[in-house]
Image (spheres, grey):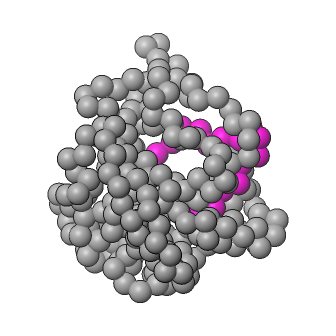
Amino acid sequence: PAWHLQHVSRLMSTADGRPRRNPYPMMQCRPLLALLFLGGAARGLVQPSPLPPPSPWARPPPGSLGPPNALRDLPVGAIMPGARQDAEGTKVEFEVERLAMTPPAFLLRGFLSRHESEYIMGSARARGELPKAQTTSGSEGARTRCRVAWLGHDAVLGPLATSVGKLLLTPESMAAPGVGVEDLQVLHYQKGGEFVLHHDGAPRSMTVIYYLNGCGGTWLPLADREGRVDTDRRSMVLN
């Protein structure tokens, strides 16, 4: 939920008020990631692609946020098998592992097909020299040694967004007027690059991170593993 994520930057401090450092070491590889934000966007996941642009005023119905029934009661550490089809009609088998109860965090192993990964990387590289990544305020200081490309939802990325939405969102939130998905954000980090502690606030209600080249990590410092929050451990780092 966006409310929980908005409090991360304020709660992550030591007893004397100093900011707590991310324990995850600086990247020694060059991660290539793709970010998909769902929430206060146009209705889209149940509509044919291309998807409309986000609407900042859209809100899912009360009580509709959170995992669908199939994942809602999945305990931390449990794994559920799944299958989907990519845009070429190829069957993709994957696994869903629950990492945290609050906020709901899941690791999807094998969700992207090889075709989808190569297509996303190729589409981003085809843009040529990518601009430096910025935050919504226009700052380049929070995200270092990183460049970005934005990809619209075409015949490949549209069905991918639909698949992930059907897996991780409730039918009520997907069907709400004005709710959908943003364009895909592809990030290429150089060695030592990072995005400092932050939140993906309203109107975003869910963030999906695709690791395209098997490199990188994400730290969720306030993830609640069945009533236990260990901010000094790396148990919630995704590799």
* Figure disc tally: 0
Q: Position of residue 228 (x, y in %)?
A: 30, 25
From the image, which quarter does the C terminus lie in?
A: top right
State the extent of the magenta-drawn residues as a range.
185-203
Residue sticking out furthest to the top: 16
Q: Nearer the viewer, residue 62 or 57?
A: 62
Q: Position of residue 119 (x, y in %)?
A: 65, 72
Taking the image as shown, residue 182 lies to the left or right of residue 77, namely right
Residue at 39 percent across and 56 percent down: it is: 206
Residue sticking out furthest to the right: 129
Residue sticking out furthest to the left: 63
Residue at 82 percent across and 65 percent down: it is: 129
Q: Is residue 202 magenta?
A: yes
Q: Nearer the viewer, residue 107 or 23?
A: 107
- Displayed quadrant of residue 57: bottom left
Taking the image as shown, residue 234 lies to the left or right of residue 147, namely left
Taking the image as shown, residue 231 lies to the left or right of residue 35, namely left
Q: Position of residue 217 (x, y in %)?
A: 58, 41
Q: Is residue 56 visible?
A: no
Q: Is residue 29 magenta?
A: no
Residue at 74 percent across and 36 percent down: it is: 28
Residue at 77 percent across and 73 percent down: it is: 126
Q: Is residue 186 visible?
A: yes
- Displayed quadrant of residue 180: bottom left
Q: Position of residue 144 (x, y in %)?
A: 71, 44
Taking the image as shown, residue 29 lies to the left or right of residue 7, namely right
Q: Is residue 156 above or below residue 31?
A: below
